[in-house]
Image (spheres, rainbow, N blue to C red):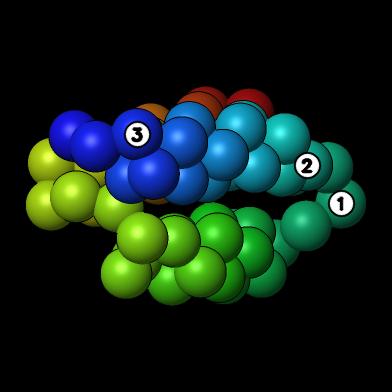
Amino acid sequence: MDHFKESAYWEAVHKLTRLSVSAQSIGSFEHEIDIVIEKYDNQISDYGKNSLHEIKQRLINGYHRN
């Protein structure tokens, strides 16, 4: 992964991990996640995209456990 794509990937990961699940419905939480992923979609590698979707799934699974 080149430096620009790697930097964009880590910025997206940071933003995803900072999303707050408190007082949100799962629909609005998923929407916020999708906005972050879409913002970085053309800036990261395919591997990075797959990784962000894995993170999305983990965040949603964590939401359902709470």
> In the image, residue 44 lies at what x, y percent?
30, 52
Residue that label 3 marks? 3
Q: Residue at x 78, y 57 (%)?
A: 24
Residue farthest along the left direction in this orientation: 46
**Where 52 falls versus 43 (above or below)?**
above
- Using the rendered view, name the quadrant where residue 57 is placed: top left
The residue nearer to you, when weighing 53 against 28, is: 53
Q: Amino acid at mark 3?
A: His
Question: Contact (CB < 8 A) between labels 1 and 2?
Answer: yes
Q: Nearer the viewer, mark 3 or mark 1?
A: 3
> In the image, residue 7 lies at what x, y percent?
46, 36
Q: Residue at x 71, y 43 (%)?
A: 19
Q: Is residue 52 visible?
A: no
Q: Residue at x 44, y 61 (%)?
A: 40
Q: Residue 20 got which mark?
A: 2
How busy is the neighbourhood of tag 3: few (under 14 within 10 Å), some, or many (20 plus)?
few
Residue that label 1 marks? 23
Q: Amino acid at mark 2?
A: Ser
Q: CA distance from mark 3 to mark 1?
A: 36 Å
Q: Quadrant of the N terminus?
A: top left
The residue nearer to you, when weighing 27 against 18, is: 18
